[in-house]
Image (cartoon, coloured by chain):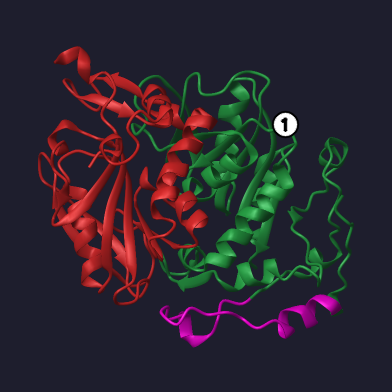
Chain colours: A green, B red
Amino acid sequence: MQTIIISSPLVSHRLSLALPVPRSPLINYHHGAPPSIRLSSHRFTNSLRLFSSAAAAAASRDSEMATEDVQDPRIAKIAASIRVIPDFPKPGIMFQDITTLLLDTEAFKDTIALFVDRYKGKDISVVAGVEARGFIFGPPIALAIGAKFVPMRKPKKLPGKVISEEYSLEYGTDKIEMHVGAVEPGERAIIIDDLIATGGTLAAAIRLLERVGVKIVECACVIELPELKGKEKLGETPLFVLVSSA
Amino acid sequence: MFASENGLKGDPRLEAISAAIRVVPDFPKKGIMFQDITTLLLDHKAFKHTIDIFVDRYRDMQISVVAGVEARGFLFGPSIALAIGAKFIPLRKPGKLPGKVISESYELEYGHDRLEMHVGTVEPRERVIIIDDLVATGGTLSAAISLLESQGAEVVECACVIGLPEVKGQHKLKGKPLYVLVEPSGVDEFC
């Protein structure tokens, strides 16, 4: 059973200063500084709940964060391994680059372990992953918890019969697709992506799966950009993230 | 070389993997029998066998990097990397990777495309395997090999789940060994 931990702001502040930030000798981190672990203040009072259907139903408006418990250094290490690239893909955007996390074998292993520990033994038979970075995290989780992996793809990539769901972009719309028959009504699913920003893609993924009678237990991402309020687009579906990047 | 010729002859796992792959005719265009691995991903046992066979092969070969070709190489590469304690490097279509990249172009049936990789992700002489779901002409894998070698890495082998008839009998790709689990499903009907 997981302990409910409530981190105080003072403790968390010390946490972010005390931990050494591992850096790959190969990567030129932006401005020579490691990506900062910036946890917005309201997270500090967010408790880690026991994972149960009752708890999921009673989930608060805030996304659930993996514990900021001082005894779990895995989160800080994961956050430190993520590189921030300014002005990509366009000016003003601080891009959260998880490729550096994938180069850090311990951080990548810990990332998967955190998700697997949360979802194994919960009768989840489907891990749906959003193209393309959801394909990196989803399959290892699916394999470890004994679930199928279902890719959710951009239009025209999946062969054979598909169903699709449209969603809004800043300018215009896009679509994601899933194979007909990949999932069955009544199956329990989680949806994985590397990051949640506006929540448009994940909301479309939820709608797609719900249309075929699947219950989405949770959406899970490595990173959340809370200022973009993506969580609000997910409706009743809970959101679990490892790192919140303000 | 095919796994069945290289120590796994008669291995029932190969049969299960082959059976789990779906053939979709006339995709993406008429005449092409598309080898769809998404059905393999729905079959947890067969998917696990796929990863286990690659992991068993590479775990003791001092491989420190697994490079995967977007997007279907991403479905197999990370699990292998995690199991053997290697880094995972995504090789992507143009414009997807942020920051400094190098790129290599390769031929398509009509025209060409480019593959990109981040600069500074491999050290000279690191031992690398390259993963994709399927090898047809080998054009994409050749571009991948060039990218990695330009950074000083040693490409130990290219590994794919499926190998099309063009590669049968072809043990090496651009001088590098090629390891393939199964032939395309459904090909016997046409012989």
Residue B34 occupies quadrant: top left
- In the foreground, A158 or A168: A158
Q: Is residue B115 left or right of residue A56?
A: left
Q: Is B19 rendered above or below residue A151?
A: above
**Residue B127 lies in what quarter of the image?**
bottom left
**Part of the protein shown in magenta:** A11-36
Looking at this rendering, what residue extends furthest in the top direction? B189
Q: Nearer the viewer, residue A3 or B3?
A: B3
Q: Amino acid at mark 1?
A: Asp
Residue A61 in the figure: left or right of residue A209: right
Residue occupying image coordinates x 19% and y 38%: B136
Hey, which quadrant is residue B186 in on the image? top left
Q: Is residue A17 magenta?
A: yes
Pinpoint residue A236: horizontal percent, then vertical percent: 74, 36
Q: Nearer the viewer, residue A224 or B126?
A: B126
Q: Say above or below: B167 vs A21.
A: above
Residue A42 place in picture, x, y as percent: 81, 65
On the image, the x and y values in percent for residue B143 come to 19, 56
Asked if one can make out residue A148 in the rendered structure from this viewpoint, the answer is yes
Q: Residue at x 62, y 58 (%)?
A: A111
Assign the C terminus of chain B to one quadrant of the image: top left
Residue drawn 78% across the image and 66% down it: A68
Q: In terms of secondary structure, where does tag 1 sit?
A: loop
In the rendered image, the quadrant that contains the N terminus of chain B is top left
How dense is the environment of label 1, judged by Cα within 10 Å: few (below 14), some, or many (20 and up)?
some
Furthest-bottom residue in this view: A32
Q: Position of residue A27 (x, y in %)?
A: 42, 78
- The residue nearer to you, when weighing A30 against B119, is B119
Q: Which residue is mark 1?
A: A123
